Image (spheres, coloured by chain):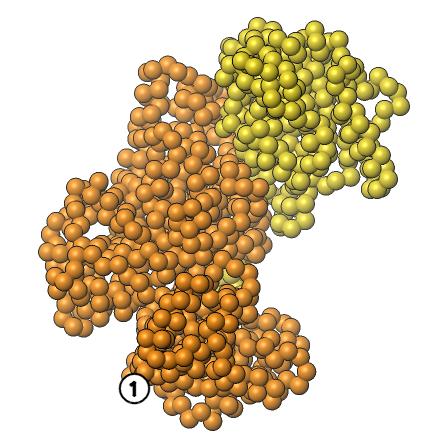
Chain colours: A orange, B yellow
Amino acid sequence: MPEIDINIIIGGPQGGGIDTSAGMIGRALAYAGLNVISVREFHSNIKGRHSYVHLRAKEGTVRSLTYPVDLLVALDPDTIFEHLQDVGKETRIIYDSGFEGSELSQARMIMRDTQKAIRVNLESGGYPSTVKGMLESMKARGGVPVAVSFDGIISEVIKDGVASRYYNTLGAAITLSVLGIPQEHIISAIKFVFGNKEKVIEPNVEVVNSAYKFAGSLNIDPSGFKKSKPEKALMLTGNDGAALGKLMGGLRFQTYYPITPASDESSAIEEHENIQWIRGESDNLSKGGVTVVQAEDELSAITMASGAALTGVRSATATSGPGFSLMAEAISFAGMDEIPVVITLYQRGGPSTGLPTRNGQSDLLFALNTGHGEFPRIVISSGDVEECVYDAMNALNYANRYQLPVIHLIDKNLANTTQLVNNVDPRKVKIVNSPVTTDKNGFKRYDLNTENGISKMGFFGRDIFWMTGDEHDELGHVTEDPEMRDRQMEKRFRKLETADAEIPIQEKVLLLGEADASFTLVTWGSQKGVCLDVLDRFKKKGVKIKLLYLKMFHPFPSEFVYEVLKKSEKVIDLESNMLAQAAQVIRTRTGFKIENQILKYNGRHVTEDELYEAIERIIAGKDTKVVLTNGA
Amino acid sequence: MAHNFRSDVAIDWCPGCGDFGIVTGITQALTEMDFKPEDVALVSGIGCSGKTPHYLNIAGVHTLHGRSIPYAVGVKLANPGLKVLVTSGDGDMLSIGAGHFVAEGRRNTGLTIILYDNEVYGLTKGQASPTMMLGMKTKGLSRPNIFSKLNPIALALASGYTFIARGFSFDTKQLKELIKKAIAHDGTALIDVLQPCPTYNNINTMEWYRERVYKLEDNKDWDPVVTEVNESQTASKYQQAYEKSLEWDQKIPTGVFYQNKTVPSFTRRINEVVPNYLETPPAKQQYRDSQGYTIVDPESTFKEKLVEAA
């Protein structure tokens, strides 16, 4: 039996239940024993514009998405118009027969530039600018349109009520039935998605029954499914992963100001404010919920989180580029006053408002340089949902162990990626803090008598000490004394040397793939998964490539990185930005210049097919720089 | 023995500065209320007022320009048992930090905000602050002020503050009593403290104020307190406070303008939703076991995300 590997796009209007639909599909596939990854793509819009979920299910590890897809499920005409390039040989295009007559000119929710490109494309092939023309064009690429009457299937079982209300369930049901997923799994998924609302579950289950009956008549031969061994996993987005990691890492105070794609993390923490405990020792500890505060702006979010940290609580905030810009001054203050605070920075396409709901990795250099003056900070990045969990725990540890601001980078693609995380391990990361003072009189918060730069902590409500954004003496009072200035500056930066020495290399950088390969691919953030999948494909073809995957940018593992790069015959840098920012960091920190670049800045995730081709071109010496363009 | 809350740091405000009276008012209030130094925390912003924490023997943080309120909110919400005082100037609070000033009215966190109101930015050589009157030309200005004066009492009312008072820095006896009432109030309190800047404000001098200030409490019928959830009572107290807030030129009222005891503080509102919040607030929680591992159970906390293959 061939290995199961299915790529699906399900698209429809924003606000029309695409998320619900994708949630049902993802869960049902997981119940069937498959591994699932999915990414949500949407406009900065509440209702109407085209949104879709790209989902992949495999028996083994699934880390990336690829084109063309096996199934394109269109819950509206716009989905047909927008996804021509994602259709290939044998792609099944499931759509409502009623869409066929829809004209491109009536598709008002398609962005003007996109509409123009679609028209040019259709006209050049001699097709009319309608859904029908689009389907003809898809057929020419090998696609197989499957016309369905959405309302017909629904009206078989729903006699009163609006049929379109069930499109999301119908889309999920048709998808799963075509794939041969047993009906029981989607029914379980529906029961889950709609909670205990019997009145809602019942008609949705009827729609599923009707859809499965209909799919049987299509005579599509589904590949059979072999159930893999049952796993216990959490199905999480990157936002969820960071939220969970923060809670596990001891976070009890989080602030935020609403911004895409960061707010979902704070909502996830708030939804779980009633924390569940590991029974046993915790029974006798003093416990409570987590406090999440929506601040009036990001200036307030970061300063409120910093204020909370003065009382000894583990505290954090989450934001995206525009909000992070506003936080700059307070991050400098946290560096100066040695305040442990975590800023989870969800990167989206910039500059300015940029592409508010799309992917980007253009804030790396900004994160490294935010805030006036020189102060120590730690900057880390995550590349998959599992890493989000443990990195969020580590971020709180770094902040509290070294008493400084920690910036945790997660890109939009990862924030909105759903993955199964197996066996989340509460004992994987130990919670570490700074020593706390026992001095009752004359406590020196900024005691210079410390080799590693770490002075003892004290807490408001327990200890008496002072803090100021001005340069300060050991007690925390303002000073402009030149010698005290030098010694405090040096003490603060000694902490960074301590951090660099104490943090294990695997939390900074990983060397993955074929260790003896002469080609080296360098990346960071959410491209990790797609790189590993592409490396596997090259390996099958006999081409060995290793992956230098960066996780910590400050302090930077310069020696390790330089050792790997200088021994490589060819090095290729892959990033979702225009200026190859990580390559710039490498150049600054190691002196090594990476000659080949694969960059993507259209706001969409990197897919396996385009990355494979780009690497092939570079290895063959046809290009030294490739800009990736996939994605609707 | 009751504490003297002054630290041993030398005060470097100008001679005759109104800030001295505020420090006296604070230390006297804390002593009379019999607080221990660790019961209280002080948060300030930037400017002359920002130096206050260093002069007091309590935990204190001298933060950023305009941000004293949100830093203080963080301290208070993480450890709601603490009495958190904010000492901030008129520029700090009503210009660069005006957004936080307004937002704090909606929150009613439980801060005691002492507004150092001298109409100028002293430390940067006397520019006009938001409370300076239109057309006024003080020493530091090259021409008369072309901005209108902001009314802090009216702004606090409109923002939802539940305790609003005004003091005069040369009447430390009244100021001390106002600070005590403000600290005792369950909600955020604002005290607008009128004070001269002897170096840069040569118009609103100590004498200028002395000729004008009078005490609201000297009128035996003055009752600013809303004691029950009652729309008409609230409306009439709000109305009289607003009217009093408009008095300025010849007679300037001091004392408590408005107090509403019926609005729950933000910490009480959080306690309604976050388990054990007031009993074990964030700062009082233990989050690791004796070996240093988390006590959070990931799968049962995120149980709705759990998937098991059928």
Quarter of the image for the C terminus of chain A: give it: bottom left
**Residue in the foreground of this view, choosing between A439 and B139:** B139
What residue would you read off at disc 1? A1
In the rendered image, residue B294, in percent from the top left (x then y), is placed at 45, 51
Q: Is residue A553 above or below residue A128?
A: above
Decide if residue A517 is in sight here: no
In the rendered image, residue A631, in percent from the top left (x then y), is placed at 36, 66
Q: Residue at x 31, y 52 (%)?
A: A577
Q: Residue at x 49, y 28 (%)?
A: B64
Choose top left, top right, bottom left or bottom right for residue A378. Answer: top left
* Total count of labels: 1
**Residue in the foreground of this view, choosing between A35 and A298:** A298
Task: Identify residue type, mark 1.
Answer: Met
Q: Residue at x 14, y 67 (%)?
A: A543
Which residue occupies the extreme right position in the image?
B221
Around disc 1, counting alpha carbons within 10 Å, would you say few (fewer than 14), some (14 to 19), or many (20 or more)?
few
Mark 1 element type: loop
In the rendered image, residue A386, in percent from the top left (x then y), is placed at 38, 59
Choose top left, top right, bottom left or bottom right for residue A10. Answer: bottom left
In the rendered image, residue A413, in percent from the top left (x then y), is placed at 39, 59
Q: Chain of mark 1?
A: A
Quarter of the image for the N terminus of chain A: give it: bottom left
